[in-house]
Amino acid sequence: MRQLNLLPTLCLATWPLTLVACGGGGGGGGSTPPGAGEVDDLEILDLGLPAQAQLIGEFDPLAEEYALRLPFLGDELLLRPIYANPSAVSTGTSGLEDAGFGELEASVVEGDNTFEFVASLPASGEQRTVRMLVQRDFAADLRQANSVKSTDARPGDGLGSAVAMDGRLLVVGAPTEDVQFGAATLADAGAVYLFERSGDAWAQIARLQAPVPGADDNFGASVAIDDDLLVVGAPGEDGSGTQVDPQVDENATNCGAAYVFRRIDGLFTPAHYLKPDAATVRRTSSFGAAVEVAGLVVAVGAPEEGTRLASGGALVAAQRAGAVYTFGFEGGQLRFGERLQAPDAAVAAEYGSALAAFGTRLAIGAPGANGLRGKAYLLRAGPTTASFDLEAELVAPNAEPLDGFGESIDLSKDRLVIGAPFEDSGAEGVGGDQLDNTKPNAGAAYMFELKGQLVLFEAYIKGTAVAGGEQFGRAVALVKDTLCVGAPRDIGAALGEEVDGAIPVAPIGSAFVYTRRAGGLELGKVLRSQAAHAEADFGASVAIGADDIAIGSPRDRTFGQGIDGSSVVMGGQGRGAVLTFR
């Protein structure tokens, strides 16, 4: 997913590492702040590091070389060498430009990276070099860190049906949670939970519900977050109002709605109630089935919306053709932008089933388009706020009816990934036989490279030990060089692996993590719940944060509440859970 014009940085917080490099001009070695007076020795004081970086080995103030470890997701590093002697100047080597007293931004790729910082005194020519060796963990090192549930988790909540992450903030939808509103208990009204991680500990920081909830609204069926804006979809909501902040009523069954929350003083508070435009509200349904927010733009999918298409000089109904609505902030006010419809709109295309945004681009999935083979549409921001122009139409190279291509979608700076959870090939890994067709509904994912104005097919992606019905690709998340693909019906027994001492005999669900390197896309790790059990739907939703991967398991039946509660598997209806890995 991810952002229009707002990128999360790995360097929102730093901690000081004091490096003292002693030259030949005298004793010293103290921590004199920059500008505090003349210092004969060369001293490198504070080297600002990302909060999640770990120094390898013990700190030695006289050492000339240090090693740091970053999580496998960390591929940007902001270094701040500050020199004690105000007359000292610095130059960076290893491809880094002159630093001065500013900041060095380095790109960290897989493997080891060495950066050198040189301080010199122009008068004497004295200089000292400090080297930083940066090592990034590989995806293969991922381990389950936490089980995340609400503090009042109850059977049937569906917690984990939708997940989104922004840095270390985790947003989780529970669209079938019953909600108390006044004296009434509203079945399946839905709720959303916010969790934040500090160090190794997650904590629930908020529970959100619609300002005026209704039974079967399914608030939380979709979620998206970007910085201080959070958007929640409620595709079962019944209001007949239009556009932004209309009056709430119950006169349009299952029309759907979306809600915008804004973070103010650390708290997310309701800001806007969104509906379709007036011309289509009576034939709109499932508005809010997919949502996206990026920068100043909000997009809402309505994949079951009908439309009317020209045919033989007349207008004919096209059920479930689908549409996407955009909204944009202008002068601090949120306004309706436009209604987007596929140029080749067709019956059952379900345009708007999945949304993703990055930079100036918006990607839209339509799993029933292209003669039910599925299609994706890539758009660029237009001349006015929240307007978009079509850039490319994408289909699978091995497209076949009912593959579900476009059921899930995500977008990064130069890559687009599209899931097809009902694709039928029995191929394994990356680049296998696309025409196999021996494993119905095994699922696949497709990666495309965005190269200037060109969109190039790059990789055909499958899981391992592929079996029919696993729905690999039902959820995808792409951040920089890391791809996570959910397969909620994956059958662990196909691998012959034991889970808690037994080989499962029914789908337990998995998520597959891939890393893009110079040689192409490689599988790093297959993720499973430590309390894996049948029918948990682990992998139904996936998200990647600053240094965590979150996997939704909306039918998880482990008994417990809050963070890392009981892992005992109970019978009956599942509460749902999100498992985090890092």
Image (cartoon, rainbow, N blue to C red):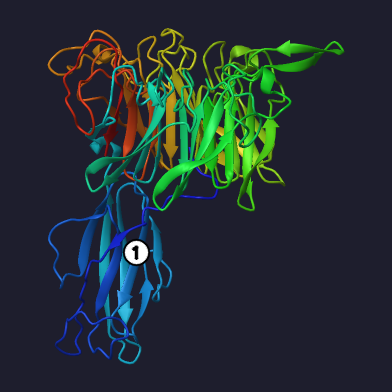
Q: Residue at x 34, y 64 (%)?
A: 79
Residue 280: quarter of image: top right
Residue 377: x and y, percent? 62, 29
Q: Residue at x 60, y 19 (%)?
A: 285
Kind of residue sitting beneath label 1: Leu
Above or below residue 403? Residue 195 is below
Residue 474: x and y, percent? 44, 21
Above or below residue 509? Residue 270 is below
Residue 320: x and y, percent? 63, 15
Residue placed furthest toward the front: 183
Above or below residue 89? Residue 19 is above
Q: What element carries label 1?
A: strand
Residue placed furthest toward the right: 313
Number of numbered labels in the structure image: 1
Q: Which residue is drawn at 38% across and 30% down?
A: 542
Q: Can residue 521 be seen in this view?
A: no
Residue 508 or residue 233, whichever sits in front? 233
The residue where tag 1 is placed is 79
Residue 347 or residue 127, whichever sits in front? 347
Residue 425: x and y, percent? 44, 13
Residue 44: quarter of image: bottom left
In the picture provided, is 268 more to the left or to the right than 511? right
Q: Is residue 535 visible?
A: yes
Q: Residue at x 45, y 48 (%)?
A: 263
Q: Residues within 10 Å of mark 1 (few under 14, many from 20)?
A: many
